[in-house]
Amino acid sequence: MPISNVPLDVLVVDDAPEAADTLAIALSMDGYNVRTCDSGATAIEAIAKDYPLCVLMDFGLPDKDGLDIVREVRQRYGDAIILIMCTGWDITQPRVAEAAALVDHYFTKPVSLEKLRQILPPIGLREPVPTEHVPPSQEGDGI
């Protein structure tokens, strides 16, 4: 698919507001469109609605753990969304290790903004959203 000038949307999912806000502010200052969520359910809804380029997520959320979210996103969207796990959870725990194996990148908190900047695509460049991933209500909107 050709690259086009589509805003780079990033979803930050963390039940700790200060952690989510810190990442959101830093990435917004870099030019990304950032939205935050504090639960797995709101993250799944936001992904379906906004189809972000990237999801930065904590493992431990109040309603779902990171493995449940990663499995659902991979089932629905394959590898089309960059998944980055940013967590303080111990990677030796089986569910955390399994989630870490399914994401594109794994970071232990606190997250290095420099490392994030190295893996996120430059602002203004993103492949258009494949039609099969656009919810029916948004088809034809030029997303």
Image (cartoon, rainbow, N blue to C red):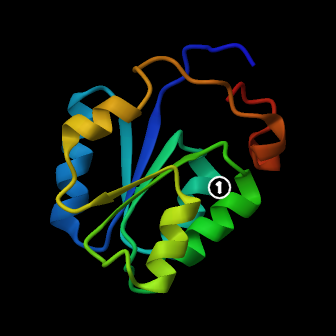
The front one of 35 and 64 is: 64
Which quarter of the image is occupied by the N terminus? top right
Vertical comparison of 47 with 40: above or below: above
Residue at the image point whose x is 74% and y is 41% from the top:
138
Residue, far front: 92
**Residue 131, quarter of picture:** top right
Q: Is residue 76 left or right of residue 100?
A: right
Vertical comparison of 99 with 76: above or below: below
Instruction: Give how far across and how far down residue 20 sits, in percent.
Output: 25, 59
Is residue 32 among the parts visible in the rendering? no
Is residue 81 among the parts visible in the rendering? yes
Which amino acid lies under the numbered mark 1 shown in the image of this protein?
Ala
Instruction: Give how far across and how far down residue 106 sits, in percent.
Output: 39, 57
Tag 1 residue: 48
Residue at the image point whose x is 50% and y is 82% from the top:
95
Vertical comparison of 62 with 125: above or below: below
